[in-house]
Amino acid sequence: MLITIRSAGVQALIGEANALRQAGVSRIRLSPCSHGFVDMLRQFDAVYNHGAPPARHWLVCAPSTCRGGLINGYAHRRPGMQFSQDCA
């Protein structure tokens, strides 16, 4: 099954690795940003593939590199445009 979430904001799911695994998610697609995308890939690789703790500093940097601000409401069963820092 393929689910796509489209939004005006940036889906900030780096802190959701464990929840996504528990839900059976085996792949995610990252949409490139104009700046810092290689660094973002490194952070996701460290967290999702190597068990590093979520890179909270990426969450701080993302708004300046990608348009629309951070959102993760759907991952927390809230309106999609919201952002919650309650991620692990």
Image: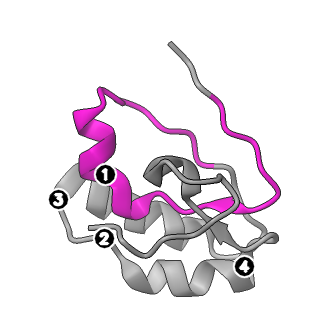
Secondary structure at numbered mark 1: helix
Q: Quadrant of residue 55?
A: bottom left
Amino acid on which disc 3 is placed: Gly
Q: Are marks 4 and 2 in contact (CB under 8 Å)?
A: no
In this rendering, which labeled residue sits more in front, label 4 or label 2? 2
- Residue ID at (48%, 79%): 58
Per the image, the residue denoted by label 2 is 54
Q: Quadrant of residue 22?
A: top left
Per the image, the residue denoted by label 3 is 51
Tell whether 27 sits left or right of 49.
right
Q: Are marks 1 and 2 in contact (CB under 8 Å)?
A: yes
Cα distance between the residues tagged 4 and 2: 18 Å
Q: Is residue 5 magenta?
A: yes
Amino acid on which disc 4 is placed: Thr
Q: Is residue 49 magenta?
A: no
Q: What segment carries the magenta color?
A: 4-30
From the image, which quarter does the C terminus lie in?
A: bottom left
In this rendering, which labeled residue sits more in front, label 4 or label 1? 1
Amino acid on which disc 2 is placed: Pro
Question: Does 66 sit above or below residue 45?
Answer: below
Percent coordinates x, y for residue 34 in the rendering: 78, 69
Per the image, the residue denoted by label 4 is 65
Cα distance between the residues tagged 4 and 1: 22 Å
- Residue ID at (65%, 52%): 80
Of the residues under marks 1 and 3, which one precedes in the sequence? 1
Per the image, the residue denoted by label 1 is 17
Secondary structure at numbered mark 3: loop
Cα distance between the residues tagged 1 and 3: 9 Å
Of the residues under marks 4 and 1, which one precedes in the sequence? 1
Secondary structure at numbered mark 2: loop
Percent coordinates x, y for residue 5 in the rendering: 67, 38
Percent coordinates x, y for residue 43 in the rendering: 39, 68
